[in-house]
Structure formats: structure tokens, C-alpha cells
Image: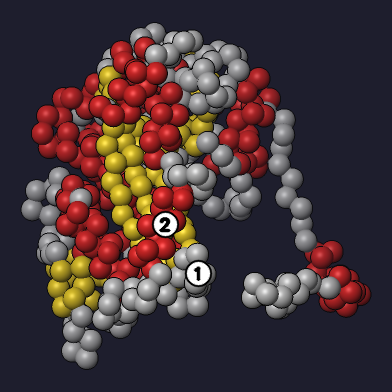
Amino acid sequence: MAYNSNGKMPFEFASKLGHLDIIKNDFVKELINEFESVQFNSDPKHIEENTYTVDVDKSDIRAIITIDGSCSTLENAINKKKSISFIKIATLMIGLEKLEQAQSVIVDPKLINEIITQYSDTICTVLPLNNVKIKGISPLETIRRIVNITIREKYPVLYETLRFLVFKEWLNNYDSTISFSCPMCGHVNIKIGEFDQFICGNVECGQNIFLTDYIGLHMEFSEENTNESIALNFMQVLEHLWYLSYLISIYKDKKYRLSQILLLKDGPLILNSQYSRLVIPIREFIQHLKDSDVKAYLVGIEKSGPFTDHAEIISKNLKQVGEVFIPSNKYIFSNIKSGGSDTDYGERVLYGSKLFVKIDENNVIVATIPTGEYTSNPKYEDFYGINEIVKILVQLRSKQFANALLPIVAVNKLASMSVYPTNNILQKFADSMIGVER
């Protein structure tokens, strides 16, 4: 490993002479020869058998709730070893009529300002990453406490959503039994019944364990690394909790209104790694809604990655606006993702299945729509509320960007914290907060 610069002397750049021993090594040559290049089928002619066309007349949906988040990590200007992350989640709640006004070729700036100020809301938090902590406790304990304070105290609607999912509150007389390790000592605790916090069963530990520890953010903490992934995953967890809080709140209050609202998320309906433990109760609740004949419309929109790349390939094969292509598990691993035939795509992490939707003559978007129970090869009728969702997605297409939806374009502006110039405000604030020993 080369030496880094200390600000006074230059970096030590890697030597290309060092490559010679590698390329001459017989063992390395043998391994390289064994590498298999994954070839994807770029001929999409065989998609017709899994395509469906939706009659894209006016949708019954009258309002859109859109969610997006952003995360900005900043280093202390003087001490680069200190850093914190600012997290912001934005939601836009607006009627379809108001959105249609914003679709005009010439839009009154006052209308845009009205949309941003009157129909939006945000939640914000900060997470210390490196060499910044609450006085008197460890960096790991600092992260745990901030996660708990953010979700439980600052934004209790998120905590109510977490409790609803973990303890499956839509079921009558559900007996909850949860097993997870203490974040501080690793002791496995089995907790029967609902709780907000309890004391670790290891008598030598005695630490308080919070319900928010069930999310598992502490599992990514490392004394050696920058821990930026914790901030990014915390942002995503907050996004999903807030997104689902609208579904749950309306369900509890006036569930019939769910039939008039689209819950739109920027990004797929996916929770990776240890956060996927929330996926099972989410699926079960959505299946409960389906079984109860409750109409609800949820969709996540993907804007980058292999699925969006594939959308460009098949765009010409989807002929009509409102046409939908549902890729099978085999198709996904043959044409989009690498993986074995015995793999079920998204089985552990997705609470929906992916499909392609043609929203106008030139653009195809990638959507994730819940199916309730997981199925590796979903049929059209498995997708929860697919007819109304496709209709409204066609109505929401943006004229500003390719493969874009107007509410997502708007909520992106609300959520974004650009590196320049607005970040200089965050930078000054961060410098004042982490410029001293904590």
C-alpha cells in the first residue's frame, strides 16, 4: 500500500513495475483463464409471452404521495478524521389536478413554489461517523442512541410503523417472539410479547436494548472503517418506514381512502442485508390487505442499474403506451442479472416484483409493485392494484426528463442536498459542531 499525502508532501503513486510480478505469475494466469465472462441475451424478441396491455384511460387515483431521501457526508475542514452525515427524507403530497397544472409547457414559478411549500414535508437527522460521539459513551452507543431518538422520540410516526410491522398489529391476539443479539455483548435474547426496550439477559452486560436495535444498523459499525454505509442504510430505512407509515396510518383511520391515493417511492421496494428482516412482515401485511379486498396502490420506481439498462434494450419491443412486460425469474438471470438457475430473485429482500411499463412512445420505466406473498414468477393478476398503477404512471410522466415521473422529479428537488453550493451551509455547521473534541 502506498503512502498517503499529509498535505505537505505528495502522494506515493503506485508503481507500474509492480504489475510485472503479477502478470508473470503462472497461478494468476491460470485463475484468469478460468474466469467466465457472463453473456447476457440482448435479443428481447421472446418477451411477448409475458406482456400485457393496460387500457390507459383516466385513473381513479386522485392524489399522489411521493417519498425520496438524500444523505450528505461531510468531513471536518481541519481534522479530516472527523465526519458526520446529514440525512433528509422528503415527501410530496399533492392532488392530481395540481400536478397536471405543473405539466404545462410554461409553468408559473409561483405554482412550483406553492407545491414545494404547501404540499411537502421533510424529516431530518444527523449521524456521527468517525471520531465524533456523545460525551461519555462509545461511538457505537452514540449511533444506537441517535437511531432510537430519531425514530422513537423525534418522529414517533416512524416508531409506530416499526411497532406495527414487528409485532404484526393488524392480527388479533398475535403472540410475538423475537430473537436477536445484544448490540453491545452479542448475547442472544429471546423476547416474548411487545416491548420498547429491555435489559440484556447477560448479567455481565446489563445494557438497555431498544426496539430500534431490531433494525440492525449497529451490525455495520466498525472501529476501522468510515461507516458511511451506516448513514446510507439509515436513510433507506427511514425512507421505507415513512413510506409505509402513510399506508398504515390511512389503513387505521379511513382505509377506503387508500383507493384514491398512489404511494410512490423513488427507488425499488427493497431492503437489503439485515434490514430484510422487515420484508416478511411488510409482505404479510400487504397480503392481508389483498385478502381483505382493501384497494391500495404502492409502487417503487427504479432510475439506474441493470434493470433500467435493460429497459432501453426492450423499449422498441413494447409497442403500445400502457404495455407491461413481466420478466420471469429465468429471464432475469438470463438477460439482466447474473445468478444460478436455482436462485429466486429478490426472495429475501424485495417486498414486490419488478416489471417494465411503457409510459409513452419513447420511454419505458422499471417499477416494483407488491404481490403480497413472494412468488418467483408472478403473473399479471398477482400484482396488487396493477391496473390503476399503470394508468396513473402514464399520466404522471414528466416532459422534462427521459423515463421520469413528475412527482419524483419534484420530490428529488425537495430531498437533495447538493455538494455545491448549498453544502457550504452544512459544512460550516458541521465544522462548528465537530471541530472540538467530543
The residue under label 2 is which amino acid type? Answer: Lys
Colour scheme of the rendered structure: secondary structure
**Which is more toward the observer, 232 or 430?**
430
Q: Residue furthest left?
A: 173
Q: Can residue 292 be seen in the rendering of this structure?
A: yes
How crowded is the residue under tag 1: few (<14 C-alpha within 10 Å), some, or many (20+)? few
Q: Is residue 326 left or right of residue 93?
A: right
Q: Quadrant of residue 276?
A: bottom left
**What residue did someone put label 1 on?**
78
The residue under label 1 is which amino acid type? Answer: Ile
Q: Quadrant of residue 126?
A: bottom left
**Which is more toward the observer, 254 or 36?**
254
Q: Helix or strand or loop: what does disc 2 sit on? A: helix
Q: Is residue 128 left or right of residue 345?
A: left
How crowded is the residue under tag 2: few (<14 C-alpha within 10 Å), some, or many (20+)? few
Percent from the top left, x then y, of residue 250? 17, 33
Residues under labels 1 and 2: Cα distance? 12 Å
At x 15%, y 45%, the residue is 170
**Which is more toward the observer, 376 or 74?**
74
At x 14%, y 73%, the residue is 198
At x 34%, y 18%, the residue is 110
- Per the rendering, the mark at residue 318 is none
Q: Quadrant of residue 300?
A: top left
Question: If the image is split into quadrants, where does the C terminus sit?
Answer: bottom left
Q: How many marks?
A: 2
Q: Helix or strand or loop: what does disc 1 sit on? A: loop
- Per the rendering, the mark at residue 428 is 2
Relative to 319, residue 82 above or below: below
Relative to 19, residue 399 above or below: above
At x 68%, y 75%, the residue is 8
